[in-house]
Amino acid sequence: MTANTDNKDPLLLRAARGEKVERVPVWMMRQAGRHMKVYRDLVKVAKTFRERSENPDYATEISLQPWRAYGTDGCILFSDILTPFPGMGIDFDILEKEGPVMNKWNTMAQVEKIKRIDPYKSTPFIAEAFKNLRREVGNKATVLGFVGLPYTLATYMVEGGSSKEYKEIKTLGYENPKVLHAMLDKLADNIADYAIYQIESGAQVIQVFDSWAGNLSPIDYDVFAAPYQSKVIDQIKKAHPEVPIIIYIHKSGALLERMARSGADIVSLDWTVSIEEAKLRIGNDIGIQGNLDPITLFAPNEVIKEQTINILKAGGAKKHVMNLGHGIDAQTSEEKAKFFIDTVKSWVPPN
């Protein structure tokens, strides 16, 4: 596809800034990946996740696959929230079935070894991929970058990978909070630098993920998650106040008010809360993203259409970016994904 020569900013970017738009923009979290045959075919050639995400040609191609197939209004970089870790002196790997694996970080001596990132040196492939994406999509889509927020990144460090109960990081916070706070503080500075680097490389919108902060009690969230979310977002906004920021937390229905206070421009809802309720709780000044249950894409088309349009109507066609309430499931058919995108794009908001 060739770039659009129209000088108008892309639809999703304008919507994320709160401007009046001609229709509601749409993309899907995890839209680039295993549910697409073209991706699964590429996996046979580039066999590891890090090879696919840290090679700018592969990362560009994978990022473009759903945009080409579905015409999404957002084209998000194919990468991982752990990608900046090596630039901080933190080694990790991502196994195809097990997910992230790494040594456990739980002492002050280890935390003191965390380096200040220089993303221009440690992740040059990211800048190249963003340059490629901006050239390819032009103004036909908004190019999104993303980062993990400190608490979520710390869960992987303390637990040594993925977790279901998050016992080790919670225990560290109770038994040795100084270590955890020192870790979170260093991560915040590094992640802010990394997000700014993405913007300066071409990202037009940044989504920040604190996916596992939803496992915290409200008291612990206010201590270990919220301050470091704000620190990252404040630094991004100081450098680039013009760039919209979306915040997403998995299972965040109890946290909406706190998310709205993070400094982000848009709160991305999961499917456990309605848009009507969200608006009552956080007001109309902050934007909303979401929030179709990803498993709805396994339903008959008439159900997908009905639930999608109900969300669009509730969103009110202003400060709303349509999305799923979580990443698209790997078993979702491409036909269903396209039907969802087409349904959003064909919906005409009432005058």
Image (cartoon, helix red, strand yellow):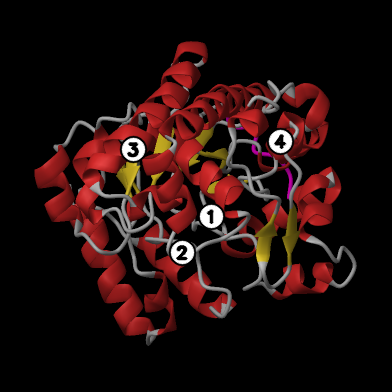
Identify the amino acid type marked 1.
Thr
Label 3's element? strand
Q: Nearer the viewer, mark 1 or mark 3?
A: 3
Left or right of 155 on screen, residue 219 = left
Residue 130's disc is 4
Most foreground residue, 300 or 272? 272
Identify the amino acid type marked 3.
Ile
Q: Sequence-wise, which precedes: disc 1 or disc 3? A: 1
Kindly report the distance in space between the C-alpha atoms of the residues bearing marks 2 and 1: 7 Å
Q: Sequence-wise, which precedes: disc 2 or disc 1? A: 1
Residue 266's disc is 3
Q: Nearer the viewer, mark 1 or mark 4?
A: 4
Circles 2 and 1 in contact, beta carbons < 8 Å: yes
Residue at image position (42%, 22%) is 231
Asked if one can make out residue 10 in the rendered structure from this viewpoint, the answer is no
Q: Is residue 4 magenta?
A: yes
Q: Nearer the viewer, mark 2 or mark 4?
A: 4
Circles 1 and 3 in contact, beta carbons < 8 Å: no
Q: Is residue 291 magenta?
A: no
Q: Is 302 above or below relative to 8?
A: below
Q: Residue furthest right?
A: 45
- Crowding near pointer 2: few (<14 within 10 Å), some, many (20+)? many
Residue 341's disc is 2
Question: Magenta segment range?
Answer: 1-6
